[in-house]
Amino acid sequence: MQRVGLRAAINAKFKDCIYDPTSGGGTWREQVAQCSCRSCPLWPLRPAPSGGPYANPPRDPAAVTSEWLRKPVGWAFLGSPCGELDQPALPHRGMAESRQNA
């Protein structure tokens, strides 16, 4: 059995938890950066892309605004700078969990 590094294990957990490659909501790092499960012990450690609209996601759960939490995963790909929710539906945060329970 090959030994897996800590960062690789954390990234794999995030991919398994929230990433949906069919959603059109961006890369796995972009989708993971938008995770809103602030009670997750790994939440402050989630990876983020090096550039683009998701480059510096909040790390402190207390600093997350309700506006940020209301945005659907992939909001920057909706074609509206405000992430208007009347655009074509993309999965909302937590969608991967509901998909797994279906």
Image (tube, helix red, strand yellow):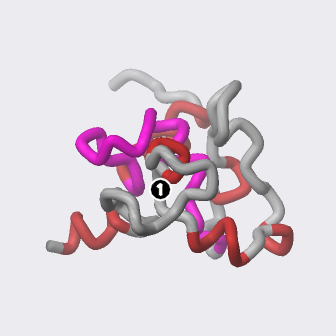
- Residue sticking out furthest to the top: 2
What residue is at 23 percent from the left and 65 percent from the top?
100
Say which residue label 1 marks. 73
Q: How many marks?
A: 1
Q: Is residue 74 left or right of residue 66?
A: left
What residue is at 32 percent from the left and 61 percent from the top?
89
Q: Is residue 61 left or right of residue 83?
A: right
Residue 33 position (above or below residue 1): below
What residue is at 60 percent from the left and 34 percent from the top?
7
Q: Residue 55 at x, y = what percent?
A: 71, 36
Residue 4 position (above or below residue 70): above
Q: Disc 1 marks which amino acid?
A: Val
What residue is at 47 percent from the left and 56 percent from the top?
73
Q: Quadrant of the C terminus?
A: bottom left
Q: Is residue 72 left or right of residue 70?
A: left
Q: Is residue 90 left or right of residue 51?
A: left
- From this viewpoint, is residue 14 visible? no
Secondary structure of the residue carrying numbered label 1: loop
Magenta-span inclusion, residue 27: yes
Look at the image and give the residue range highlighted in magenta: 17-38
Q: Residue 1 at x, y = what percent?
A: 33, 25
Magenta span: chief secondary structure: loop
Which quadrant of the figure has residue 44? bottom right
Q: Residue 13 at x, y = what percent?
A: 45, 48
Q: Compare residues 94 and 72 and report the one nearer the observer.
A: 72
Q: Compare residues 7 and 73 and report the one nearer the observer.
A: 73
Which quadrant of the figure has residue 5? top right
Which quadrant of the figure has residue 86? bottom left
